[in-house]
Amino acid sequence: MFFNSFKNPVADFIMWWSSNRFIWIPLYIFFLWMVYKKYPKNFWMVIITCALLVLVNDQLCNLFKSGIGRFRPTHDPVIGQLVLTVNDYRGGKYGFYSAHAAISFSIATFISMLRNDAPKIVIIAFFYALLHSFSRIYLGVHFPSDIVVGMTVGVFTGWLFAELYVKLYNHILNKNK
């Protein structure tokens, strides 16, 4: 309720658009271009890995949401009427854990591990993930614990997929020698 209480038109606008996945497409394209610069010969592997990363996180999150069935703050019978919304957006019925947080942190972790030689990219990737995730609390559609679990799952899956990608990339490089 604390993070949800700071409503003003400017913050509402920023958080509403920060929460939209499609607004970030130019940033994703930039991340992919930066990875392409390092891995041009097997860039198709990056695209496939990112797609699988998003798919796995999205489906795993949906499994938890329906399996656990914890209400979002906006649907919670105790506090639901107290939650401030933007554009009357309330999200789906269940919210544990945040797919927005999991996906954005998995992409940030994956990109950072592949481009750890570019610290500005790492900072931008995690700033985006934090803003994207925090916007979900601000909008009242996730509890902080939903975000923390989503961040944790995202960092883990991003790390796992980066490790698998590097092993596969090195295997292909060694095979082609």
Image (cartoon, rainbow, N blue to C red):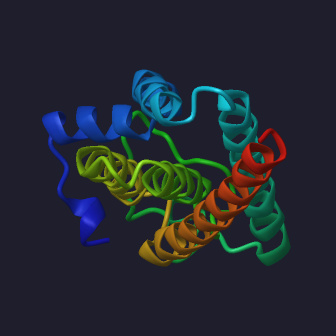
Q: Residue at x 53, y 67 (%)?
A: 155
Q: In this view, does 2 lie above or below 120?
A: below
- Quadrant in the picture for residue 166: bottom right
Q: Where is residue 11 in the image (x, y as percent from the top left)?
A: 19, 41
Horizontally, is 92 left or right of 67 in the view? left
Identify the residue shown where x is 39% and y is 48%: 132
Question: In the image, is residue 153 above or below residue 33?
Answer: below
- Please give the name of the residue rendered at 59% of the width and 47% of the height, measured from the top-left corner: 91
Front residue of 158/93: it is: 158
The residue closer to the viewer here, 176 or 88, is 176
The percent coordinates of residue 110 (x first, y second) are 54, 54
Q: In which quarter of the image is residue 59?
A: bottom right
Quadrant where the N terminus lies?
A: bottom left
Q: Percent x, y for residue 137? A: 39, 60
Location of residue 97 in the rendering, given as x and y in whole percent from the top left corner: 62, 68
Q: Which quadrant is home to the C terminus? A: top right
Picture residue at 67% right of the left edge, 67% below the top: 160
